[in-house]
Image (cartoon, helix red, strand yellow):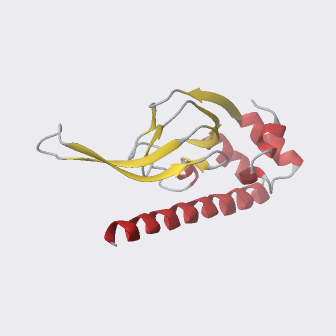
Amino acid sequence: MISPELLRRYPFFGPLSDEQLKAVAMLADQESVGSYTILLEEGKKADTLYLLMEGSLSLFYLVEDERQPNLRKEFPVGDINPGEPFSISALIEPHVLTSSVRADTLCQVIRIDAQALKDLCEQDCDLGYILMKQIARAAMDRLTSTRIQLAAAWA
């Protein structure tokens, strides 16, 4: 559990009422992540929603040659900055991670158990609606960033 006041600092949780903040805070923990730690891997089950408090995270895809597994290449697709959520696939079916995440520096994150959060959203539909709006906004921001990267690569 963390303090609801900690969540209140971040715009992602800004639209939540005091009661909703308290309920979400009950499901959340704060965690340190060491530099260069692979926190999430593309294709794995997404069961935790995260919010970056401090530090820097990179989103990337790893491409491997099936015949020669030692031939691997990372393709950067974005960054996560403080205040931004990640592992948003935890709240979007089919709940599978769409990219890998690596800590570029020592990071502080908030972890929220996705199943418990989904259960809470079932009980409080307003909370579910607010969170889905925030998740959709985060997804659209990532899509815009990816489009810019693609345009730059093809220019």
In depth, the one of 25 and 79 nearer the eye is 79
- What number of labels is visible? 0
Task: Identify the residue at the far left of this view.
Answer: 67
Location of residue 123 with respect to 69 vertically, above or below: below
User: Which quadrant of the figure has residue 53?
Assistant: top right
The N terminus: image quadrant: top right
Q: Give coordinates of residue 112: x percent, y percent.
A: 65, 39
In depth, the one of 42 and 103 nearer the eye is 103
Q: Is residue 46 visible?
A: no
User: Which quadrant of the figure has residue 30?
Assistant: top right
Image point (12%, 41%), residue name: 68
Q: Give coordinates of residue 24: x percent, y percent.
A: 75, 42
Q: Give coordinates of residue 58: x percent, y percent.
A: 47, 45
The C terminus: image quadrant: bottom left
Q: From the viewer's perspective, is 33 left or right of 5?
A: left
Image point (70%, 56%), residue name: 131
Q: Is residue 81 visible?
A: yes
Q: From the viewer's perspective, is 125 left or right of 62?
A: right
